[in-house]
Amino acid sequence: MGKQLYYKDKPVFGFDIGHTSLKIMQLDRKKKGVSVDGYGTISFDPSAIEKGVITDPEIIIKAAYTLLEEQLIGKITTSRVAVSLPNAFSFNRILTLPKLSNADLAKAVELETSQSIPLPLDDLYYDYEVMASLNEETVEVRLVACPKTIIDSYMTVFDALGLEVALIESNINAVTRMVTHTETHDIVTLIVDFGSTACDLSIFDGTTIRVTSTVDCSGETITQLIAKKLNVTVQQAQSIKTRYGIDMSKKQALILDAVEPELNKLTSEIRKVVRYFSERNKSNKAIGQIIILGGGANLPGLNSYITDKTRIPTRLCAPWKNLSFGKLQPPHELETTLYTTAGGLGLVTVGDLST
Ligand SMILES: Nc1ncnc2c1ncn2[C@@H]1O[C@H](COP(=O)(O)OP(=O)(O)OP(=O)(O)O)[C@@H](O)[C@H]1O
Ligand SMILES: [Mg+2]
């Protein structure tokens, strides 16, 4: 997946298939920086996807069609897409291997893949990339693998939509591209993608993604917990969540009480990966910041909550800092982090900004 399929010289747009919604974004490199040509989002019936596999393609195809034809802000001018894979169902590994010829390296990676990934090799697509030489004898290799069932189901959808898939990469890769586009690189960063059904965590050390994990802390559950505690409908709970969140409000204590067990899952997982990283990393650099993104990151008060619980400064990814919307209506302020994956995918078209 990835480099072989990817042609830098032709435009692509980012297509993010979440558990509950599609998000798309096309970016373009202009003299003054990067600008948004078009973007949009649409929800769909979550029963369309099971364990990462699109089991009911019609639902996704219809939603995508409506989004592209009717709900787009601005324009999409290409039929080539960059697509991300769900973290919870793909595998990211950093392998340390001896320096080998290409053919022997391929064999070594195949062996590692079959040993370290709990699925038969025949059921997986995988790809790898040599990242860095550790010393004269060893190299680090980044491996990504994903069940064929997931990728094949995506291909069915894009075929039906008449879209050409130019790049498939892990969701983590896409958000990391957006984070590095927006933020400084020299701090070790824990990235949290807070989605509707789970949170994906990854540690970016300035060059490479080091640790990844997924925890079932879910935006949907938070809504349900608020609904139950305040005795309101799910719809009302959703609007209370987005408006007040766990920030100061009349109901703050009640809301916090309701959602804390769910947020606890996230903060414990953060502590766990921080510990794991500090035990293993050779450079002795500590994690300097947490950046939260994904729709759930917009929960008012979440960043100070995480800062408080982990003692690591936490803030929202500000994906629009280096992107211009020109004459287009920008996303609502409460939606800023929703497009991080789609935007990160869209950025592949822009290439290396330092060149
Ligand atoms: N302002 C807000 N405050 C709190 N939560 C919000 C806000 N806006 C959106 N959300 C929540 O974000 C979640 C959707 O996030 P996102 O679109 O990143 O998930 P997804 O991509 O569909 O799912 P996943 O990333 O798990 O595959 C929903 O649970 C939604 O309620
Ligand atoms: Mg998502």
Image (tube, grey):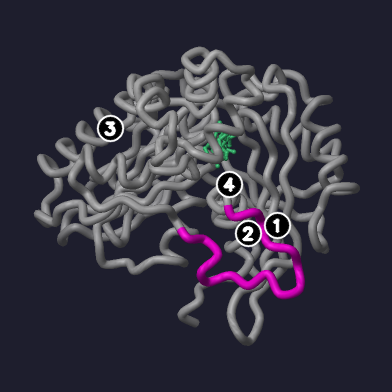
Question: What residue lies at 78% left-to-right and 34% top-to-bottom?
Answer: 157
Foreground tag (3 vs 2): 3
Residue ID for mark 3: 267
Q: Please provide percent x and percent y for residue 304.
A: 31, 46
Residue occupying the far right of the picture: 69
Q: Marks 3 and 4, how far apart in space?
A: 21 Å
Q: Name the residue under label 1.
A: 13
Q: Does the magenta stretch include residue 144?
A: no
In this picture, residue 133 sits left or right of residue 122: left
Amino acid carrying label 3: it is: Thr
> Where does label 4 land, which residue?
338
Of badges 4 and 1, nearer the viewer stands 4
Task: Say what amino acid the circle numbered 1 marks.
Answer: Phe
**In the image, the residue with mark 3 has its CB under 8 Å from the nearest atom of ligand 1:** no
What is the C-alpha distance between the residues marked 4 and 1?
Answer: 16 Å
| Left or right of residue 279: residue 343 | right
Q: How far separated are the C-alphas under marks 3 and 2?
A: 30 Å
CB at disc 4 and ligand 1 closer than 8 Å: yes
Residue 114 showing in the rendered view:
no
Q: Which of marks 3 and 1 is nearer the N terminus?
A: 1
Verify CB contact (< 8 Å) between mark 1 and mark 2.
Answer: yes
Residue range in magenta is 318-333
Mark 2 sits on what residue?
A: 346
Tell me the residue at 34%/38% (across/down): 212
Across and down, in percent, residue 321 comes to 51, 69
Could you say where residue 94 lies in the image, as x and y percent from the top left? 30, 43
Q: Residues within 10 Å of mark 1 (few under 14, many from 20)?
A: many
Q: Earlier in the sequence, mark 1 or mark 2?
A: 1
Q: Check disc 1 and report its element: helix, strand or loop.
A: strand
Label 2 sits on what residue type?
Gly
4 or 1: tag closer to the N-terminus: 1
Kindly check if marks 4 and 1 are in contact, taking CB atoms under 8 A apart as contact: no
